[in-house]
Image: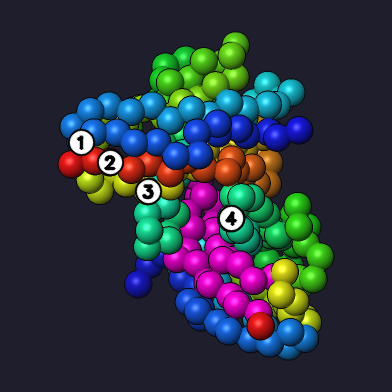
Amino acid sequence: AQKITQTQPGMFVQEKEAVTLDCTYDTSDQSYGLFWYKQPSSGEMIFLIYQGSYDEQNATEGRYSLNFQKARKSANLVISASQLGDSAMYFCAMREGLRGGSQGNLIFGKGTKLSVKP
Amino acid sequence: DAGITQSPRYKITETGRQVTLMCHQTWSHSYMFWYRQDLGHGLRLIYYSAAADITDKGEVPDGYVVSRSKTENFPLTLESATRSQTSVYFCASLDGTDTQYFGPGTRLTVL
């Protein structure tokens, strides 16, 4: 069974609008971390945002926020005020186990390709 | 420059040849990782290392060998390359905030 599921292979959003990229996860650990990475067409993997399983507030980083719903095991990425430069692949990933106490291995979803229309 | 670098960035080789992909980080991070990225699979872990001389297998280790004699270097070797190993390879290291930072990737083509 997939541990990270991203159900949207591709999405379109109008420039300046907000967009939500879906991510659901599966783990039996109580302690885990959730990450989002951006991969533009140039190929590099860029870290965007992190949410720990014990964090009570949703993580935010500039225009990025993570809508964390623990009971539903979802960690959706919200991008506000989309820009043309946001066009990229977006990967959700999970680290199982204790922060700093595990090997830190990430399990990745298959990604969502976001296209921002002018 | 500080950060994590990979070399070469592009490599074309032939089936059966040995290929080594290099990864170097300047942060002195303990943990380092090798992933491969293929269409339809996202990123999958090949090997990781918790420190110098400590390595362990990930999800897809077959056909790969790693070593880590120094903290800053984590080379990945394909002992006898196969076409199925055509992929983009990413190296990453783990910082103190539990975040993995990735190198720019190596695009490997095995003919």
Q: Secondary structure at mark 1?
A: loop
Identify the residue position indicated by label 3 in the image: A88
Residue B9 at what x, y percent from top left? 48, 77
> On screen, B58 above or below B71?
above
Closer to the camera in the image, A37 or B86: B86
Amino acid type at circle 4 is: Leu
Q: Secondary structure at mark 4?
A: loop
Residue A62 at what x, y percent from top left? 26, 33
Identify the residue position indicated by label 4 in the image: B39
Amino acid type at circle 1 is: Glu
Identify the residue position indicated by label 1 in the image: A15
> On screen, A76 above or below A72?
below
Q: Is residue A83 visible?
A: no
Name the residue furthest top: A71
Magenta stretch, main secondary structure class:
strand
Measure the alpha-carbon separation of dots 2 and 1.
6 Å
On whether disc 4 and disc 3 are found on a single subunit, the reply is no
Amino acid type at circle 3 is: Ala
Quadrant of the snapshot with the N terminus of chain A = top right
What number of labels is visible? 4
Q: Residue at x 29, y 33 (%)?
A: A13
Range of residues picked out in magenta: B85-110
